[in-house]
Amino acid sequence: MTIIILTTLCLATALMFWPRLSNATLWRATITPLASIIGSGFLVLGPILHSSFGLYAPAAMAALSLLAYTFGAAVRFNIHRIAETAPRPTLANQIEVLASWALTFAYFVSVTYYLNLFGAFAVSLTPFNTPLNAELATTAVFGVILLIGVTKGFAALERLEQISVGIKLAIIAGLLAGLMVYFADKASSDELIFSPATVSGWPALTLGFGLLITVQGFETSRYLGNNYDPPTRVFSMKLAQWISTVIYLIYIGLLAYVFPPATGAISETEIIDMMAIVAPILPLLLVTAALAAQLSAAIADTSGSGGLMVELTRGKIGEKQAYTVLVGIGLALTWMADIFQIISYASRAFAIYYALQATIAALSCAQPIRKSLFWALALIGLLAAVFGRAIEGG
């Protein structure tokens, strides 16, 4: 098992850092949304879906990915709309400003969420595994991101992000290889587990709304206009969502049938205990992937927030100043709220943003069918913001 995992990891690493791929413009544009989508998702989503939906976890994952992709369609429509020379509706302009401010808050909270998970995983396998030390680790990483962002700007953040995403995707490949072997062993021994769902109906739907934060991140492409043209941003967003959906579906599809459901509250580091059963090397690799995942996702949203603040203030606030504001708010949230409160805040903020983006698309779209779809998405986003249930942890 260990040999298979390490071989897959090495091959995936070579691919991620292959110059023809790593230097390609489309891949660099894809890295930012992909880093944000596969940030916390593969860490917390597996245990939560497995515990809540049992054998239906892959179906829940598919529904969540489909919802994210349809919200992405609204954002992509707006990227094209903004690039057009024709005047935009005044109401759409006003809602766009409101949506941007909503996303600004969402980014501030999501970066805090990512880095708090970073802190939790950083100390998880050490003798210093306490909430205080996790918060100190989070604070230190905030300082590093601020230093790089202020002194080097977006280009340096993007390169750091690219390295961390490459490491993360390579480890995920090794993790999936290990899970495939473990799944095959269980299947051949007729030991697959088909656990029943513990939630259904309205509670299941509201839990799904609360999990929207775990598949967000595609919207970062909307705010990279200073670096990539609209067609590149639109296609890179699609590519990021396609790649992340495939990874999530394989991951949840393997995970859902080889472990008994968790009992009691879910810990943010629950996945480490689960993977230790598959192979002894996986916890260490998973912690490494967790650190890379949270760092890359935090950098992605930090980069997105910088571009957003510049656009909102018409250049009065620069990207480097925006990074400073973000870090200040992030540190305040880190020391004043627990991670599950932060997840709840972020989920609701992103739901509001997606609802507003769908409203803008509906107001601007001339095709009746697409207009109806955008209005339906706006309603779903509003429902998610109002009724989304926070993830319970302990």
Image (cartoon, rainbow, N blue to C red):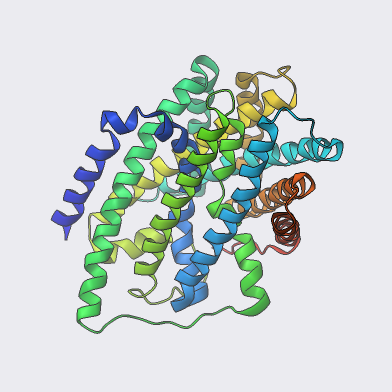
Tell me where residue 202 appears, x and y as whole percent: 68, 75
Of 202 and 271, which appears nearest the observer? 202
View extreme (left): residue: 3
Q: Write the residue at 41% across / 65% down.
A: 252
Question: Quick one: which residue is furthest to the front in this view?
Answer: 367
* Location of residue 113 with respect to 202 vertically, above or below: above
Dividing the picture into quadrants, the one containing residue 22 is: top left
**Is 369 or 327 nearer to us in this picture?**
369
Q: How many marks can you see?
A: 0
Q: At x 64% / y 53%, what residue is drawn?
A: 347
* 80 relative position to 359: left or right: left
Measuring 21% from the left and 50% from the top, which residue is drawn there? 8
Q: In the image, 91: left or right of 131?
A: right
The location of residue 79, given as percent across then percent down, is 64, 37
Q: Is residue 254 above or below residue 281?
A: below
Q: Can you say which quadrant of the picture contains the N terminus?
A: bottom left
Q: Is residue 107 visible?
A: yes
- Is residue 103 shown above or below 51? above
Decide if residue 252 is on the left or right side of residue 69. left
Instruction: Give the quadrant of residue 4.
Output: bottom left
* Residue 93 falls left or right of residue 228: right
Between 77 and 161, the residue placed more toward the observer is 77
Residue 18 vs residue 331, the one in the foreground: 18
Q: Position of residue 371 (x, y in %)?
A: 74, 54
**Position in image of residue 164 (x %, y %):** 38, 36
Instruction: Evaluate whether residue 39 shows in this view.
Output: no
